Amino acid sequence: MCLVFKPRELKRMIADSDYAVRVFGKTIPIQQVINKNKHGHRLIKGKDNKYYYLVFKRDFFQSFGNLFQTNQGYGESLNIEYIQFAKDNKVDYICFIYPDDKIYKIRPERMLETGKIRVIKDFQSEIVYGIPKYKQEYTCSVPLQELERI
């Protein structure tokens, strides 16, 4: 997969992930920043010897209730590949961090158990012999009631 970001978008994503690490570190002391992916998500080891996967979000998934026809209101969503990465790396909690410094957490296994899976879009992943190849992106969405505030 080859995603291209404009320099301004990339700069903002890096700034957002740095901000998320600073906010998280005020709540749970950080022992080590282990990994950062191309979208600015961070794999963190806390001084409590737990592993956290940090995701900065600008806002909640506001259309969760309408999209899944539930009365559960807002939700949160993450690509399946990132949840699987968290599971493969024995992450204890996926943490969603917002601009108002609020942090919500959920275990990766719990997110997959209670979440609703959907295909959100087809996107061009590469061009082979002049022909664009398309790939589907899968997300897992959970209502806010599944997240625990820390």
Image (tube, rainbow, N blue to C red):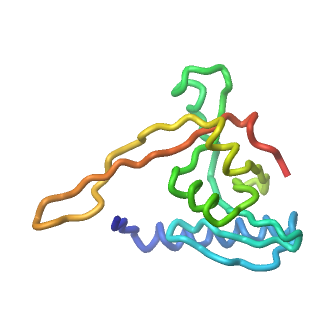
Location of residue 51 by image quarter: bottom right
Q: Is residue 82 above or below residue 148?
A: below
Task: Report x, y in % for residue 140.
Answer: 55, 42
Q: Residue at x 41, y 49 (%)?
A: 137
Judged left or right of residue 143, residue 78 is left
Task: Report x, y in % for residue 20.
Answer: 71, 65
Q: Residue at x 71, y 62 (%)?
A: 91
Q: Residue at x 70, y 55 (%)?
A: 94
Q: Is residue 94 above or below residue 11?
A: above
Q: Is residue 91 above or below residue 110?
A: below
Location of residue 144 by image quarter: top right
Q: Is residue 125 above or below residue 44?
A: above
Task: Report x, y in % for residue 148.
Answer: 81, 44
Of the pair 12 and 71, the residue shown nearer to us? 71
Q: Residue at x 69, y 63 (%)?
A: 90
Of the pair 26 and 91, the residue shown nearer to us? 91
